[in-house]
Image (spheres, grey):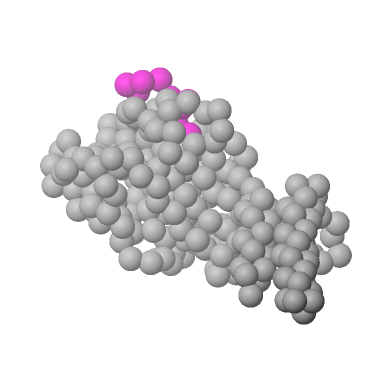
């Protein structure tokens, strides 16, 4: 049954190859030391809008990371949100997912020791008129790490021009306590890839070809071994 396992691996690679970035914020647009979000919230790839109800003075930037970064992007800056007075406040972004399914969100994040340690992720399917919590609150580490949310089972987010996402921050215990977010990516699978009548792109065809070749080679080896044992 080894060839079955290899087939599964190749199919997984095909799935990964089909995922595309819909929108990306690397937060490198701001001038270091500025605050308020006007420059920090500019989308860097694709389309989308971002906003926050943090006090403007507490929307800042600091040293960034390459974790989850787009190839070639420098670490640059990261979005910094601070102050215990903003417990219960949020960061919100809206993205048109038309033409995509299997939506996922990922970003690099970290916090200081007195930063927000209980952060709840939400999604919206109607431009923010209603919000739905997803999973349990997460607690960032004190060094940059990857945080991701696989929303592939939320069909209402697929092909949706009114999709929205939000993080509500809580648990900060000091004025200086803060969290950083960097390289925030909204990704999905182009819906055309799920159409069985669609001709696969070259990269997908190559991966599938390698998968089938691997299965044929293993089956041929197994058949050869059986013939050898028969002649013995």
Depth check: give the residue in front, 124 or 143. Answer: 143
**Rendering quarter of residue 76:** top left
Q: Answer yes or no: is residue 105 visible.
A: yes
Q: Which residue is at a point 13% across and 42% down the rendered structure image?
A: 174
Left or right: 84, with 127 as reference point: left
Name the image quarter holding the C terminus: bottom right
Up the image or down, 30 lies above or below 228; here it is above
Q: What residue occupies the far bottom of the structure in this picture?
A: 230
Left or right: 26, with 133 as reference point: right
Q: Which residues are magenta?
A: 26-36
Left or right: 204, with 109 as reference point: right
Q: Which residue is at a point 79% across and 76% down the rendered structure image?
A: 231
Q: What residue occupies the far left of the structure in this picture?
A: 174
Specify whether residue 29 is painted magenta: yes
On the image, the x and y values in percent for residue 90 come to 35, 50
On the image, the x and y values in percent for residue 149 come to 46, 58
């Amino acid at each position: 049954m080894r060839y079955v396992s290899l087939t599964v691996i190749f199919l997984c690679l095909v799935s990964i190859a089909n995922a595309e970035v819909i929108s990306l914020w690397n937060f490198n647009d701001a001038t270091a030391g500025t605050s308020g979000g006007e420059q920090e919230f500019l989308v860097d790839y694709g389309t989308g809008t971002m906003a926050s109800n943090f006090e403007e003075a507490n929307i800042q930037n600091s040293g960034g990371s390459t974790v989850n970064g787009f190839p070639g992007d420098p670490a640059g800056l990261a979005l910094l949100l601070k102050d215990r007075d903003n417990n219960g406040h949020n960061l919100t972004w809206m993205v048109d997912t038309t033409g995509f399914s299997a939506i996922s969100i990922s970003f690099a994040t970290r916090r200081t020791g007195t930063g927000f340690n209980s952060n709840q992720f939400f999604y919206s399917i109607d431009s923010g008129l209603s919000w739905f919590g997803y999973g349990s609150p997460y607690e960032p580490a004190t060094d940059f790490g990857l945080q991701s949310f696989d929303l592939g089972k939320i069909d209402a987010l697929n092909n949706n021009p009114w999709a929205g996402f939000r993080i509500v921050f809580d648990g900060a215990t000091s004025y200086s306590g803060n969290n950083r977010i960097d390289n925030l990516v909204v990704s999905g699978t182009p819906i055309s890839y799920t159409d069985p009548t669609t001709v696969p792109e070259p990269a997908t065809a190559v991966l599938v070809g390698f998968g089938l070749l691997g299965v044929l080679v293993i089956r041929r080896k197994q058949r050869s071994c059986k013939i050898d044992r028969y002649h013995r």
